[in-house]
Image (cartoon, grey):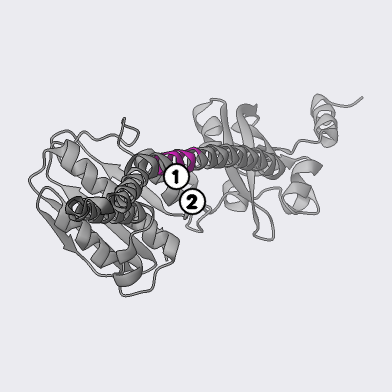
Amino acid sequence: MESPRETLELILHTVPQPVWVIDHGGAIVYANPAAVGALGYGDLAELRGRQSHETVHHHYPDGSPFPASECPMLRSRQAGETVHSDEDWFFRRDGSMFPIEWWSAPLDLPGGRGAVLAFEETTRRRAAEQAVRERDAARIRAAESRATGRRIVESATAARRQLARDLHDGAQQRLVALLIDLQLAREEFAAPERVPGLLDEAVEQTRAAITELRDLAAGIHPAILSARGLRFAVEALASRAALPVTVTGSVEVELAEGVEACAYFVAAEALTNAVKHSHASQVTVTVAATGPLLTVEVRDDGVGGAVAGGSGSGLAGLTDRVDALDGRLTLSSPPGGGTVLRAEFPL
């Protein structure tokens, strides 16, 4: 007839979960085949009598020594309490490390209180969890990309509508008026004293139409960007601002057209917001290409409190445009502490 111990060992011999027993001194007195195999050994005799901590738990994952006095697995033997961890590690015989989840419970043995420990390798589980996290992150990125795309399309549509309105209400009306003046001038040859006045009016209408068309073109893509570059274009913005603006920094590299235009409009929007909302006394614009980044920073000493999604700020559209170029737009605007808008573009 088998003894209770032999029966227990027979049961543990067949279970798939690695299990071992340590005595009151921390030495291994038993390990089932699943534990022996999981740790890279061929037979229980290679483990029996060895200190459990020094055998499989001797270093931290970064390679620094792990003192046995700090090992939580031994707490069940020392304090008589059951302990569990779902994130730990073991070392195999060949020195390779693998993640585990473990349970340790006190066990009274003839020589004193020991412990029984069961563990489970979690490599596959962690890989599955990581795959789920990556899948969820990919879905979130895809959803954000679709939302960004919709906002860009909506912004472009709104810009086209505004452009059409500006052309219809401004330059187009002036050109119609010019046409009427010229027709009247042609018809008034019988009264030559009226012709000079009509021609003067036609000249003024032509000049006004040209100015409006130039302003519209600047809103689409400022000519100064192509002619002089980003730093000069920002200086031109600063010269027209309704408060003192200092421009610093330099750009000594050739910029992609899309990046250059987006950086310009970041500065333009920030200056517009500063003039309209900040109550600032001065603004500093820094434009610099350092290392791998082009940076545009607009800093004012106003009242702060700006919000990226605030009504009428225009920053949501800018954020989408910056994101589309793999850049990053950040806003810092504590109440009473001024506002800093910073855009970074990879070169």
- Marks 1/2 in contact by CB < 8 Å: the verdict is yes
Query: Residue at 31% across / 33% down in the picture?
Result: 312
Quarter of the view holding residue 279: top left
Which label belongs to residue 320? 1
Q: Is residue 140 left or right of residue 275?
A: right
**Mark 1 falls on what kind of element?**
helix
Query: Residue at 62% across / 31% down in the picture?
Result: 103
Magenta part of the chain: 154-163
Amino acid type of the residue that numbered disc 1 sits on in the rendered structure:
Asp
Quarter of the image with the C terminus in it: bottom left
Which label belongs to residue 324? 2
Amino acid type of the residue that numbered disc 2 sits on in the rendered structure:
Ala
- Count how many numbered circles sit on residues in the image: 2
Dominant secondary-structure state across the stretch colored magenta = helix
Q: Is residue 344 magenta?
A: no
| Residue 98: percent from left, percent from top | 65, 50
Q: Is residue 15 left or right of residue 262?
A: right
| Residue 176: percent from left, percent from top | 36, 45
